[in-house]
Amino acid sequence: MINPEYYPLVRMVIFLVAMMAFVGLNALVLVYAERKIAGHVQRRPGPFHVGWHGLLQPLADAGKLMAKQLLTPWSSDKLLFWAAPLLSFLPVILLFLPIPFGETLYGLNVNLGVVLILAFSGLNVLALCLAGWASNNKYGLLGAARAVAQSVAYEIPLLISVLTVALMSGSLDLHAITVQQGAWPWQWYGVLNPLAFFIYFISILGETNRAPFDLPEGESELTAGFHTEYSGMGFGMFFLSEYANMVVVCCVASILFLGGYQGPIESGWWWFLLKVYALLFIIIWMRWTFPRVRFDQLLNINWRWLTPLALLNLVGTVIVLRLAG
Amino acid sequence: MQELQALSPYAYGLYLLIILGGSLAAALCKNLIRAMAGLITAMLGAAGMYMMLNAPFVAMMQVLIYVGAVSVLIFFAIMLTKTPAGDSPELGSSSKIAAGLVVGVMPFVFLVSACLNYFKQQVETPPDIPVDQLGQDLLTRYALGFELISVVLFVAMAGAVILGFERRRSQ
Amino acid sequence: MIPNIAQSLKAEAMVECDPKTGQAVQLRVTAEQLLPAAETLDAAGYFLEDVSGVDVQDGFELNYHFDHVQTPGRITLRLMASHDDPKAPSLALLIPGADWHERECYDFFGVDFKGHPDLKALLLEPGTEPPLIRDAKSRIPAFELSLVYPQPEPEAADDEEAKKAAAKAKAKEKAAAKAKEKAAKADEANPESAAAKPEAATDGEQAEAETPEAKPAEADKQEGAEQ
Amino acid sequence: MTMSPQLSSDPSDFYSQSFSKGARENTLILNMGPQHPSTHGVLRVIVELDGEYIVRAEPVLGYIHRMHEFMGQKKTYTQYLPNMGRVDYLHATAWNWAYVGAVEQLAGIEVPERAEYIRVLTCEINRICSHLVWWGAYLLDLGAFTPILYAFEDREFLLDILQRVTGSRLTYCYFRFGGVYADVDDKFIDDTRTFIQRFRKRLKMYEALVTKNFILRKRCEDIGVLSVQTARKYGCTGPVIRGSGVPYDVRRAVPYSVYPELDFEIPTFSEGDAMARYMVRLKEMEQSLRIMEQVMDRMPDGDIQGKTPKTLKPPKGETYFAVEGARGKIGVHLVSDGSATPYRVKLRAPGYSNLSCFAELSKGTLIADAVSILGSLDLVIPEIDR
């Protein structure tokens, strides 16, 4: 038998493997959801031919991606070129570790869960930089430059709004933050402090490079931005990590602002997934509705509005907390 | 995670390898971006060392600030300045190697001598300090050091901004 | 309005056109007159529609079509560039829209626009032989195209005029006969155009009938020269 | 921005070599196209970038140049007619009309009134098709993915209608010298009326969904401002010059066909920016609907084909005929030497002149704005390259 000392480690490893499966499965579901939602937004049925109502389409897509030849541009920095997609994908798995999907359904119980997620989600931008630079493509480079500026900028309001919640709950432990909110919507931090929730939501669009803030890959200007030169699973990795990142930030949003796995009638992981998918649906819906903003507008939104608002909100929250006791 | 004590020698070795490998890459790569990648690796290894010392908060901050933010600023600086981001041949000249050796060896000597003189081997894991106490200490006892570090970050940011402005002015 | 502007331009010849040609006024200009004329038109609110080249016997005829954004009526400036050394002054610095049209002409006819800021191939691969240059046999004389061109051989025209003054009807018959002769000659050279020949004479008549405002003398000259 | 030195040694072509680097250091020369999502086909724009700001831009044309003008010298008048549908595939009927009109003017062919009405009707339907494609594609340039599918849904309806009479869906060759190819039937008229009703509602929806969108306005307003003077100097026509406030429309300026009898307005906006050009096109679709309604109310009975000689040999001479296409003034300069083959056909493409102002408009803008400007000029590359 395994030494009981190692139980947390074993649990972590099992959870990591499970999370890999979850991320993969989630990507499939999200790809299907994205295409179906896009289809219905655009008044067409979406994928329809592979499987019932196109259910197996994501599998077909994945098969195609995996079967494709991996091309390395002759002038690229080969080591960094292939390190970048891995760097983009692997840390994302780590991000799922501290997330409490249910009361006992978590990988690692750390009291610094929020910090862990924030710390490792920053690695993604490095991956984008390296990908853009290493592919030695001018579009890639411009995409990388945009990714850097955008992530650095949007990380600030994101951190501040997370900090606001941390102050309200007095903890950085995701589990504790969940429990402090009640089962009912009026007990959730998102309702108590809607401004923080709003700022967080806008910031995650910027952080995960989702439309209307998808400038690092803004296809009408930069063809595909940082992943212009990637083919097959190289692109697939970025793709997976984008979806995984979306899931992570939505998980964090549902924990910090929507009461996590708690919900009316009976709490459980179903509430959690429901909230996460509702947020994901909104993000997908926005992508298929809005035009893309321009780069300087994107930064102006952040520096002129979101960051000052987030700071004011933080100060206001502190004052209210002090007054309330 | 005190239960994982038994694994610590292996983890220590692993982190050491990461730090050494990363530092060597940072020092020896002629390509600036590769050097930066090495630096990031070394910083990640350092974060692991903090974890070993039972300071998860500091480790996270190491990742958040140094790996996530400072290296991105370095990347920005590389792109904004006229530095050739590719292989730069002039780095290989002998006088520069000599200068690099002096700069590299001196801290090494000082640090090793300091370690040998002042530190005894410590087996016990230091206690995990809660975040609020950490915050208290940082804002009272270690306020000066804390502020100095902020100044470093601030200078890095301001440098990036100034570089950006100078480019704009030259238009 | 249009004739006023047109009259104020310095040109070698000016003709008010039949509406059938889709143009109000045509002016024949020399290389020196082109730029001032374009300048005046530009100042009067005209825009350059296009620059089109036509390869005729006399050279490459460049048509600068100007139109006004409010008053209808197209003014055409016609400039002849010789076949041997095709060149023309460039309008590109005055009217930036001329830039591409001139480059297109350079592509299609090899006309060298002097003073063009960046004369290089636009639509064709650089170094391509100009495709719209016709072989010498199939070219038509410029005066068949437009009334702004004088007849090239004045002596022959005098003969014809004398004949016409004497008996116009006879001349017409003769004209028809000569046209047939010419057609026969042309047939040897160019069998393709054989089908077109029988109508040649009637065409000439039509042209005469349908351009009543045109100076009769010139029309006569035209007919004469055709023979 | 610095690049790895390998790129500087890349083999480059004639245009890259002639596009020499400017005086400034640290600029980046970027080839947008020939394959690039924003250039709507195979257009190439070489840009010199400083960061994301465009220092200089130079469009390179000719990637799908087919030398239509040369083909015109080799084919008979009738054989050349199908080429017209291929010049501008989005507004093929207008090109049909420009060429057919030029030949009719030169040869003196009369067109029956019913045929004129049918021409106006199909041309306006086709204009709406063209504007719809532009609308969708422009929003795609701005990163909105959905409108193009809405636009194509409407356009599909129109293509079905046009297919009934013309027999084709894109490269129409419907007009004939002296008339049109086939008569319209009742179903055509009914379908068109249904469409008009339906499309009025859709236009309202487009306005609410897209035109009033905050992000869209920020991306279009004050972008690529084209003054009246510049527009005129570059020979811009169509919605581009009307977006600068000049009510220049060939249908009114040099009236042809039955347009003088029809009641419609020429929408103009004086801002001269991308938004003004956008609004002009949207309003034009409404006006086209009005024209279509009037035409269907007034359409007389009668022949659809006038008398034309079997082998067409227009008399010697030249003619210039212009019509208002979706992109501006389409002109055909036709020279005849009296034979069955045109002596010279010169096609005046509106997009060609409209695009030529791009280099000036894009100077000093961000790449994203340049894409917006390029889209707002409404490019159809086959028409520009011919």
Image (cartoon, rainbow, N blue to C red):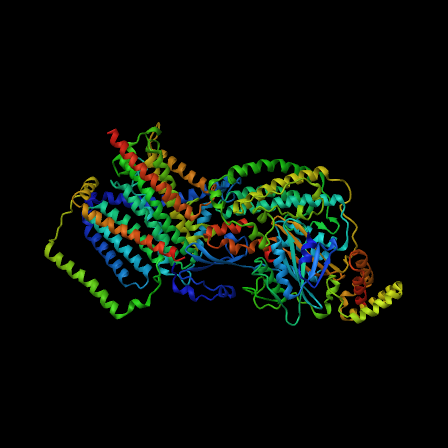
Residue A307 sits in quarter? top left
Q: Is residue D123 left or right of residue D220?
A: right
Instruction: Tell whether C115 sits left or right of B101.
Output: right
Residue at point 35%, 47% (across, down): A153
Quarter containing the N terminus of chain D: bottom left
In this rendered view, identify the residue nearer to me: D198 or D377: D377
Give the side of residue D2 with respect to residue D291, left or right.
left
Q: Depth check: C212 or C12 in front?
A: C12
Quarter that holds the C terminus of chain D: bottom right
Q: Position of residue D221 (x, y in %)?
A: 49, 45
Residue nearest the viewer, comparing C171 with D334: C171
Q: Position of residue A217 (x, y in %)?
A: 43, 50
Q: Position of residue D96 (x, y in %)?
A: 68, 51
Which residue shows up at 61% across the image and 56% down it? C42
Q: Position of residue A85 (x, y in %)?
A: 37, 53
Dividing the picture into quadrants, the one containing residue A279 is top left
Quarter occupied by residue D279: top right
Residue C160 in view here: yes
Closer to the camera, A87 or D127? D127
Q: Can residue A184 be seen in this snapshot?
A: no
Count of numbered circles on the image: 0
Residue A129, above or below A98: below
Q: Residue furthest top?
A: A265
- Taking the image as shown, residue C183 lies to the left or right of residue A265, namely right
